[in-house]
Structure formats: C-alpha cells, structure tokens
Amino acid sequence: MVTASAPGKIILFGEHAVVYGQPALAVPVSQLRATATITSPPYPPVLNAKEPRAGQGEIWIEAHNLNRTYRLDEAPTHDLLALAIRLTFGHYQLPITNYQLRITLSSNIPLASGVGSGAAICTAIVRALSLHLNSQISNSQISTIVFETEKLLHGTPSGIDNTVIAYEQPVYFIKGRPPEPFTVKQPFHLLIADTGLPSPTKITVGEVRAAWQNEPERYDALFLAVGKIANVARAHIENGEPEALGPLMNRNHILLRKMGVSCAELDALIDAALGAGALGAKLSGGGRGGNMIALVTTETQNRVQATLEQAGAKRVISTTITHNQ
C-alpha cells in the first residue's frame, strides 16, 4: 500500500488576469489536503463493490467524497480521476491492462470553491501511482500531467492551480513561463471564508473571455492593473511588509468586481471582514461563489472569524503563509 497527498491552494493576487499573461501569486494551504491510497490484491472489503476478477488487470477507483466505487474502464470520458490515472500510465508508457489496483481517494478540500480541489486530487493520484510504480517524477512533470486534467475541468486554465499544488510552495506565475518560487520574509495570517456557493470556474473564465473579446481595451486595462498589483504585492512579501498587502487586496477585489466575477455573497463577507478589522479582503479563485480571503493579525483574527461566521460563511479556515508550507 502506498499513499500520497497534495494541498489545496489559494490565489493571493491575479486571478483571471493570469489567463491573459499577467502575473499571479498563489500559495498552498496545507490544512486542506487530498489523499490517494493505492492497494494491490487482496483488498479489504468494500460495501456494494464488485471485486476484480482473478487474473485480469483491473483498476478500481474508490472516491469517498463522491460516494462512488467504479472500474476505470467503466469511467465516462469526462471523468477527471480516470484521466489522471490514464495520463500517468501514459507518461510512463505502461499498459494499464497489466495492473490490478484499487485507488482510494479522499479529501477535505471543498469542491468547486476555488481552492484547487480538482488539481489536488489529481496531483495526489499522480504521486501515489509514481510511488507504486517505483518511478521518479519531478514536480514539473506532475504539474504538466495535472494541467491536462485542468483543461477538462476548466476549459482554458491558466496553469496556476497545478503549478502551486505540484510544487507545494508559494509561486509567482506567468502563463507560459517557468514558475518562480518566492520568499515569504515574514509570515502573515489569512482567513479563508467559504460562501457555500459553487464557484463555476469554467463558466466565469469563459464569460470573462467573451467580455474581453467584446471590450478588449477595457479588459486589457483591468488585467494590466491586476498584474501591477501582483508585482507590488510580491515585493512587499519578499521585503517582509505583509501589512501593506491589505490595501492591495481591496484594490484587486474592486477590479475583479469590474470584471463581473464577484457576487453579493462574496461582497457581503468582504464587507464584514473589513468592518471587523481585517487589513484587506478579496475574493480568491474564479468568483461568483467559492471563497474570499481576509488579511488579519493575531489581535484581529478571532474577531474577524466570528464576524465572518455571523455574516453567513459556511466555513472559515485560518492559515499562516510562510515560505515552507
């Protein structure tokens, strides 16, 4: 039996604009993790699951969060988990039919919330399969494989989710360039509050693209402004000035609202956090639901968290951003 895991992620600055060549900053969230466990026969019993037939190569997927157990060869073509498995075997140029495995998957990362649940579970699958096959694989190769699954999930992904999750460290990312890990000189504290609404990243990315095609000059200006904020934010983080991130978060959120990707629920949580003393707040991820993040201090953290919960947040996670997540 082998097990591998991968973290969730949040985007600090740059969502949507990153699709158009602007920089973004993203960090892993170690408290949120997806795990893949691979076992070979004989298996422990699973309720209502058929077992592989003796002497035949069969791979079973047991997805706890989806309450599903099914054979790989019975998976639909759009199945994200099956694609990650097939791509990994393809990477190693190994025939799937030679293997008899059960891949058990679990995660505490909220689905469709902008925190990288899809990229995390696929990264965990790739890592676990590589361990099972006793084969070396680099973070870059994992990221490349998982990016292909992101295309299925998001349509035209930026590549930031698979990058920050595969490398599991703070990353400065520009589409089409190698990711740049960056230094967090002074740790800072964030609260991640979930609206409870699904965040349809594929839909919001598509709608932003349609809006950009309709008004290219307006949207290019918005994307450029977001990119400038990301660059300034990186400098503050590397200089140990995290308190300066607050106003930048507020400005970034205003620009995201102008892109049309916020919603009443996100704006309400952001207003609540700022009213309770957060240094800054913004949506994180695709928008139209999902999560917002708030920059807090040790003195304001409890008050802001309680206020977010009172304002309707379904869950609030506290995380400290450091260089070594």
Image (cartoon, rainbow, N blue to C red):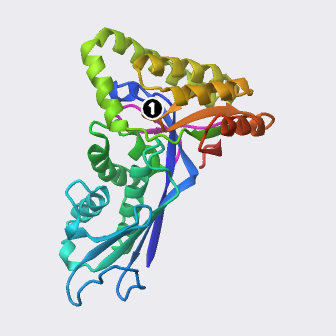
* Relative image position of residue 72 (x, y in whole percent): 25, 69
Q: Is residue 241 visible?
A: no
The residue positioned 63% from the left and 19% from the top of the image is 247
User: Does residue 300 appear left or right of residue 150 in this picture?
Assistant: right
Picture quarter with the N terminus: bottom left
User: Does residue 143 appear left or right of residue 241 in this picture?
Assistant: left
* Relative image position of residue 2 (x, y in whole percent): 44, 75
**Residue nearest the observer in this picture, 124 or 208:** 208
Using the image, determine if residue 226 lies above or below residue 293. Answer: above
In the rendered structure, does residue 164 fall within the stretch colored magenta?
Answer: no
The residue positioned 39% from the left and 28% from the top of the image is 16
The residue positioned 30% from the left and 55% from the top of the image is 80
Task: Please give the residue where the numbered disc 1 appears in the rendered image.
Answer: 287
Picture quadrant where residue 93 is located? bottom left
* Relative image position of residue 278 (x, y in whole percent): 70, 28
User: Does residue 48 appear left or right of residue 240 in this picture?
Assistant: left
**Residue nearest the observer in this picture, 314 or 216:** 314
Q: Secondary structure at mark 1?
A: loop
Residue at the extreme top: 217
**Residue nearest the observer in this picture, 295 or 269:** 269
- For badge 1, the amino acid type reads Gly
Q: Is residue 156 visible?
A: yes
**Residue nearest the observer in this picture, 81 or 67:** 67
- Highlighted range, magenta: 169-188
Picture quadrant where residue 174 is located? top left
Using the image, determine if residue 314 lies above or below residue 129. Answer: above
* Relative image position of residue 34 (x, y in whole percent): 48, 59
